[in-house]
Image: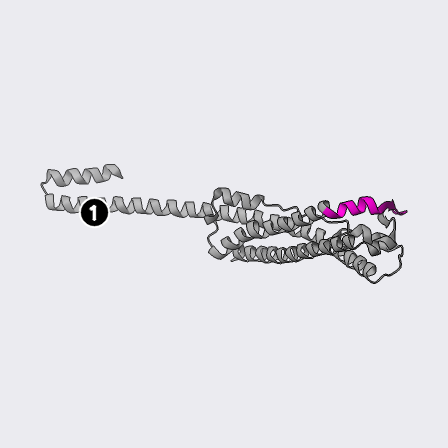
Amino acid sequence: MIKFFRKIRQSLLSENKFSKYLIYAIGEIILVFIGIAMALQFNNWNEGKKAKEKERQVLTEIISDLEFTLIDIDRVLNTRTNNLKRTISSTETIIKVLKTDQPYHDSLAQDFRATNAYDQINFKTSGYQSLVSIGTDLVEEPELRSAIGQFHTSSINSVKGGFQEIHLDFYSYMIDYYRKKFTTEFNKNGIEKLIPNDFEALKKDKEYQQSLNAFLGVNLSYLDILNNTQDEGEQLKKDIETYLND
């Protein structure tokens, strides 16, 4: 092709057809620019295709991470023997029994044990870390990009903060009561029980009851945070799946 154009140029010059040569030269330049533009367009299309595929891979990994996180939130909320909801329910039961001067019964040993239970969420964020390392602009949809960042920073940090508050409150106040005022036993099924050494004394121990009320408060706060984070995670997962399927 190059030899063909060269022969045309030489022929026009040898025949002193300068005006035709000029027109030909301009046309050749235009063809070169068109070729360059097409090459750039193809390169941009190819790079865009690669970016879109990378976006799909990262978002698919984020969906997998969200599924893992949501399962673990459910574990803490519902599926353990002493889950967060059971902890709150048992704490409320103990507070009511002590406040209303009710007699001790064996089932309270399980409630006392449940007030001693709390757990944190295991977050999986490898997909989000990959997105950050590449650049969050990889996600083309601004609202989805913002929602992903919101969940993996603000929402997760709120959960971690709620857990740290429970952890601090337990080790600052509650653990001393369990060490000094209770005896640990196990039933025939190997389930741990906390039996008060002096139940009647607990009814009169206002400091213990106040600490129990405070511990209930931080657990309720943690429950609220987890419920909100669970809702946000489920919505984010649904939004990403919808975006990928469009």
In this figure, which residue is indicated by the disc labeled 1?
A: 27
Furthest-bottom residue in this view: 100
Tell whether 148 sits left or right of 78. left
Residue 105: x and y, percent? 89, 57
The segment highlighted magenta reads 173-191
Residue 107: x and y, percent? 87, 55
Q: Quick check: can you spot residue 190?
A: no
Residue at point 50%, 42% (across, down): 133
Q: Nearer the viewer, residue 150 or 128?
A: 150
Specify the quadrant of the image occupied by residue 17. Answer: top left
Specify the quadrant of the image occupied by residue 7. Answer: top left
| Display colour scheme | one colour
Tell whether 6 sits left or right of 237. left
Residue at point 65%, 52% (across, down): 70
Residue 13: x and y, percent? 12, 39
Q: Nearer the viewer, residue 61 or 87?
A: 87
Residue 140: x and y, percent? 46, 53
Q: Residues within 10 Å of mark 1 (few under 14, many from 20)?
A: few
Q: Nearer the viewer, residue 193 or 188?
A: 193
Q: Is residue 186 magenta?
A: yes
Q: Is residue 5 magenta?
A: no
Residue at point 67%, 52% (across, down): 73
Name the quadrant of the N terminus: top left
Tell whether 25 sits left or right of 50. left
Q: Quick check: can you spot residue 133?
A: yes
Specify the quadrant of the image occupied by residue 36. Answer: top left
Number of numbered discs overlaid on the protein picture: 1
Q: Nearer the viewer, residue 183 or 67?
A: 183
Label 1, secondary structure: give it: helix
Q: Amino acid at mark 1?
A: Gly
